[in-house]
Image: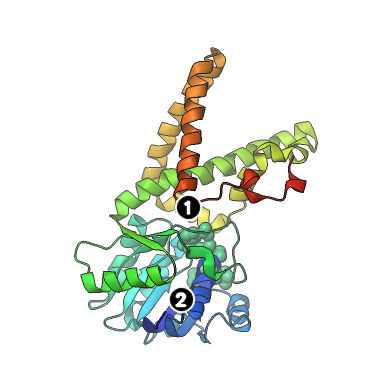
């Protein structure tokens, strides 16, 4: 792959930022990667790991002369970061982000984008429960979707340039409105995380009652929720604070469906339960057929750890 941008600046060098560094280096997509992260420790580690060619003391210094600027910090920081870097952005540069919500990003970043800078919000739908500069890897975005939510007046040439960048990172690219993105992700990502956090909290309370049995027998299903619930608390706090409407809408539907299940169990309605479980199994098969997960038993875990 050939170089797509002379100079790329990343604000935030955690899982997503460091993964972008790895794939850009592997594919030779950037002439120079400039970085900034909040703490001196992360900035130093990023240099040690060779993630970036230059590290900067401020976000504004990092974006100077960059053709592509990618915000890779938690969504709640974007407004402040955009306010700081706005005056330092180069005319003609593309400013994008990787945030898990999109309407709030348009609201918080939009007002700080100077004329002549192309602001195109984005979200790579790819991740793990790990965080920090050491957690990244080049394959993270491979065969995953990256959703771009360009505003109605976005420059088509800039959008297509950014699409090309994500394709070069191995992703498939889709565009949609920020509002539609937030609704779709509320059910496919945000609600599952909320449920995982909640079930782990409920079980942790029970742990007091049942001794160590919640952990001992966790291979029965519980541990798969704990993986999701191990995700970064700051990132997820910001997601729920910034996608409130869509999450509450989906939570309402979820609660109704849960009540229907509760009722089926109470009344011994095996047919209703079987119908719903069979439908769910088909969805799992569809995800595997679409290449978004593996069909290996137990998610490909080592059999010796199976309970
Ligand atoms: P992460 O591993 O926790 O890394 C966050 C990075 O942002 C760290 O380098 C942190 O620096 C830096 N940071 C925090 N506050 C900052 C500030 N005010 N200014 C500059 N840098 C700051 O997080 P992540 O998982 O990469 O997530 C980053 C973004 O990607 C989030 O917006 C999230 O919504 C989105 N996203 C995440 C996933 C996922 O599965 N994790 C998937 C798709 C999209 P320090 O290390 O110095 O604190």
- The image quadrant of residue 207 is top right
- Of residues 221 and 207, the one nearer the viewer is 221
- In the rendered image, the vertical position of residue 57 relative to residue 193, given as above or below: below
Q: Which residue is mark 1?
A: 291
Residue 66: image location, x then y, percent:
38, 83
Q: Quadrant of the C terminus?
A: top right
User: Which residue occupies the extreme left position in the image?
Assistant: 153
Q: Could you tell whether 218 is left or right of 106 in the image?
A: right
- Mark 2 falls on what kind of element? strand
Rendered residue at 37%/82% (across/down): 5
Kind of element beneath mark 1: loop
**Residue located 47% across and 35% down the image:** 282
- Of the two numbered discs 1 and 2 in the rendering, the one whose residue sits closer to the viewer: 1
Left/right of residue 12 with respect to residue 167 in the rendered view:
right
Quadrant housing residue 63: bottom left
Closer-to-camera residue (289/65): 289
Q: Which mark is residue 190?
A: none
Mark 1 surroundings: few (<14), some (14-19) or many (≥20) residues within 10 A: few
Task: Give the residue pinned by disc 2.
Answer: 10
Counting every numbered tag in the picture gives: 2
Residue 74 x %, y %: 48, 63
Confirm if mark 2 falls within 8 A of ligand 1.
no
Tell me: 49 left or right of 178.
Answer: right
């Amino acid at each position: 792959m050939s170089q797509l941008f002379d100079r790329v600046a990343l604000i935030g060098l955690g899982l997503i930022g460091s993964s972008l560094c790895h794939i850009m280096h592997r594919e030779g997509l950037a002439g120079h990667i400039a970085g900034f992260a909040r703490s001196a420790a992360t900035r130093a580690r990023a240099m040690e790991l060779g993630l970036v060619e230059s590290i900067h003391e401020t976000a504004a210094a990092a974006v100077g002369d960059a053709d592509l600027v990618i915000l890779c910090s938690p969504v709640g920081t974007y407004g402040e970061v955009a306010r700081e870097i706005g005056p330092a952005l180069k005319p003609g540069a593309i400013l994008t982000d990787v945030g898990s919500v999109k309407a709030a990003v348009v609201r918080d970043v939009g007002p700080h984008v100077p004329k002549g800078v192309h602001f195109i919000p984005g979200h790579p739908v790819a991740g793990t429960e790990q965080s920090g500069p050491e957690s990244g890897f080049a394959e993270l975005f491979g065969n995953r979707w990256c959703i771009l939510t360009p505003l109605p007046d976005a420059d088509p040439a800039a959008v297509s340039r950014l699409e090309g960048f994500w394709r070069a990172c191995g992703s498939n690219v889709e565009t949609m409105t920020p509002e539609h993105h937030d609704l779709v992700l509320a059910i496919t990502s945000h609600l599952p995380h909320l449920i995982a956090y909640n079930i782990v909290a409920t079980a942790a309370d029970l742990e007091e009652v049942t001794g160590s049995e919640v952990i001992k027998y966790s291979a029965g299903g519980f541990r798969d929720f704990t993986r999701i619930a191990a995700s970064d608390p700051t990132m997820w706090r910001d997601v729920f604070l910034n996608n409130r409407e869509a999450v509450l809408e989906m939570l309402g539907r979820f609660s109704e469906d849960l009540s229907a299940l509760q009722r089926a169990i109470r009344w011994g309605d095996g047919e209703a339960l079987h119908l719903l479980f069979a439908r769910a199994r088909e969805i799992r098969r569809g995800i595997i057929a679409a290449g978004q997960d593996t069909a290996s038993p137990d998610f490909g875990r080592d059999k010796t750890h199976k309970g």
